[in-house]
Image (tube, rainbow, N blue to C red):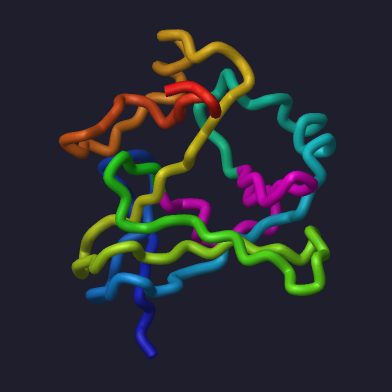
């Protein structure tokens, strides 16, 4: 079966993943893989990451983070978008083991061959979202409704 998605250079940022064929809405495309770390291990390795504007870390649940810097796959190249065509879906382990939870990227609308895959990273930082911080976490998706930043409003605020 031919690959549905491929990695190549992106106009949004660095590398990206693209549809190699038309993809219908609701298609599970790829699992986000990497080394499983506790949040404390992730913080010890990378700090809070707030000053870089770049990360391959995916918060899996309250206990664990997926570090695609280590043992990661091509899902790490899917860029953020303010009008995404995909979403990240967490599959919780049926037995309740948070180490066995998984993240999959799924299409939320029909995607045409050649279109770049994007999802909203949903980045919420524990530090103030200053202008400088918004520049560090700048969004380059180019969507008409682009917010200009990958940062999301803090929970409980609008």
The location of residue 132, given as percent across then percent down, is 45, 9
Query: Bounds of the magenta span?
Result: 57-78
Q: Is residue 62 magenta?
A: yes
In the picture as drawn, the residue positioned furthest to the top comes out as 131
Asked if residue 96 lies left or right of residue 110, the reply is: right
Which image quarter is the C terminus in?
Answer: top left
The location of residue 109, given as percent across then percent down, is 27, 64
Q: Residue at x 76, y 37 (%)?
A: 42
Asked if residue 58 lies left or right of residue 108, the reply is: right
Asked if residue 147 lies left or right of residue 88, the reply is: left
Q: Residue at x 59, y 60 (%)?
A: 90
The location of residue 120, given as percent across then percent down, is 41, 44
Task: Determine the image quadrant of residue 144.
Answer: top left
- Closer to us: 49 or 70: 49
The location of residue 14, given as percent across then percent down, is 38, 42
| Number of numbered tags placed on the structure image | 0
Q: Residue at x 68, y 48 (%)?
A: 67
In the picture as drawn, the residue positioned furthest to the bottom comes out as 1
Q: Is residue 144 magenta?
A: no
């Amino acid at each position: 079966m031919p690959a549905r998605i491929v990695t190549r250079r992106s106009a949004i940022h660095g590398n990206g993943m693209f549809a190699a064929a038309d993809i219908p809405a609701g298609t599970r495309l790829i699992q986000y893989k990497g080394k499983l770390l506790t949040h404390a291990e992730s913080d010890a390795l990378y700090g809070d990451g707030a000053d870089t504007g770049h990360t391959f870390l995916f918060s899996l649940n309250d206990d664990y983070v997926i570090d695609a810097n280590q043992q990661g796959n091509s899902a790490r190249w899917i860029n953020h978008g303010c009008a995404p065509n995909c979403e990240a879906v967490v599959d919780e382990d049926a037995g309740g083991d948070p180490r066995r939870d998984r993240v999959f990227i799924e299409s939320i609308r029909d995607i045409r061959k050649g279109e770049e895959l994007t999802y909203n990273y949903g980045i919420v930082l524990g530090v103030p979202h200053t202008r400088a911080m918004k520049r560090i976490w700048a969004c380059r998706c180019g969507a008409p409704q682009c917010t200009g930043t990958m940062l999301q409003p803090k929970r409980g605020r609008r």
